[in-house]
Image (tube, rainbow, N blue to C red):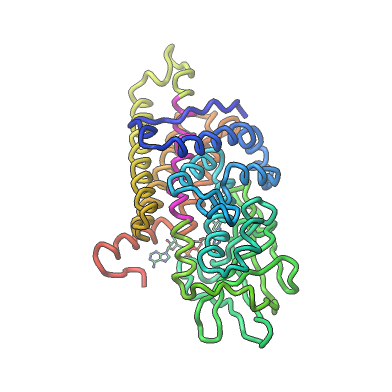
Amino acid sequence: MKPDLFEAPDYYLLDELLTEEHKLVRDAARSWVKRDVSPIIEGYAQRAEFPRQIIGGLAEIGAFGPYIPAEYGGAGLDQISYGLIMQEIERGDSGVRSTASVQSSLVMYPIYAYGDEAQRKKYLPKLASGELMGCFGLTEPDHGSNPSGMVTNFRDKGDHFLLNGAKLWISNAPFADIAVVWAKNEEGRIHGLIVERGMEGFSTPETHNKWSLRASATGELIFDNVKVPKENLLPGKSGLGAPLGCLDSARYGIAWGAIGAAMDCYDTALRYSKERIQFDKPIGATQLQQKKLAEMVTEITKAQLLAFRLGQLKNEGRATTAQISMAKRNNVEMALNIAREARQVLGGMGITGEYPIMRHMMNLESVVTYEGTHDIHLLITGADITGFNAFK
Ligand SMILES: Cc1cc2nc3c(=O)[nH]c(=O)nc-3n(C[C@H](O)[C@H](O)[C@H](O)COP(=O)(O)OP(=O)(O)OC[C@H]3O[C@@H](n4cnc5c(N)ncnc54)[C@H](O)[C@@H]3O)c2cc1C
């Protein structure tokens, strides 16, 4: 792969709106990605392998629990810092960002927000340092967009719960030490349970042959009469709102992350357009390529403004689920469109691993589907503005 010469576009001088802390956090993540992710990621993606050696670096840049208080090992940062970290990581690779999103928003967040003090102390510091890795089991083979239909269930057996069922498409599953699993009790109420690797009847087979997020490990969670200690139930919140609250946090991070992937594609295409000579002039001097590049930077700028304002609302505790849906949907579609256009700017070179564009493009095909599909987020906006729920 070519050396990482990335320069971030900042067309509307958004850096001026960031605090010194935001910039420090962002720059540390950017340098780490250049040093430790860019040189290796293409090889890992080609081999469909998760680069385990980056776990320590992710912990060091504060990517595991950026907004979790320092007393539990988190970085204690605000939501804009969290967003900027996700942007920089996804600039490197959406699969690496997926690992960090799951650990932070789908494992640490529910333990922090819905767990008791003993659970927080037991798990959060080790998750923050990367000593423990986690995954989040909501999706099932027959229940994706409609998780309320889940059939995974647990029964009260007096001194323990007995867990049965299966989850599909679970990021980090093949190597996770713990899983936050959503399952129904006897009354059909959804609760979160912490399931640990090694519990009898719990297995995590890997999902192979993905064309997308190849540097992220995806798998199943199988529960065959797993005895889960009662103290592993998250007591603070139940019902579908509990996993959906985690998804709000993760989707917010994706809205920022997608900007990173888009910036990398744009920056690569811009540089290439200035260097590639056809018909005795750089292709960047032609109107058609300028149209592509000008539209890319316009869309990135709009997405940056959306994410920044959402970050302010989130810092104030005012960001709604529907606002987060809008940003996730818009920014991921924006990034996917930019990846496709940037791929064309590079001509044949665009399909090779010499440049990151095709990898971003294929990754984004998962990002547009997971954490609520593109269509479902549109329906969430539709329901919010009309008051009519069209997907039920
Ligand atoms: C790489 C990857 C990693 C993932 N990681 C995780 C993870 O860590 N944890 C986890 O729990 N899940 C994870 N997922 C699962 C992901 O969240 C689901 O794939 C997603 O929610 C969609 O579910 P589905 O694939 O079953 O599609 P379906 O729900 O079957 O949807 C298929 C199509 O139908 C559309 N559709 C569905 N309902 C409606 C409706 N009412 N009206 C109109 N259109 C509709 C959808 O928009 C979609 O286009 C991951 C998925 C992938 C691909």
Query: Does the stretch in magenta take in 105?
Result: no
Query: What predominant SS class does the magenta segment belong to?
Result: helix
Residue 144 coordinates in the image, percent (x, y): 50, 66
Residue toward you, 299 or 199: 199
Query: Does the stretch in magenta take in 263?
Result: yes
Residue 69 coordinates in the image, percent (x, y): 53, 54
Total tally of numbered discs in the picture = 0
Residue 303 coordinates in the image, percent (x, y): 36, 42
Residue 294 coordinates in the image, percent (x, y): 34, 29
Q: Is residue 27 above or below residue 115?
A: above
Q: Which residue lies at the image location 54% right of the left edge and 63% below the top edge?
A: 112
Q: Is residue 245 left or right of residue 202?
A: left
The span shown in magenta is 250-270
Q: Quadrant of residue 373?
A: bottom left
Q: Is residue 40 left or right of residue 104?
A: right
Residue toward you, 324 or 221: 324
* Residue 48 visible in image: no
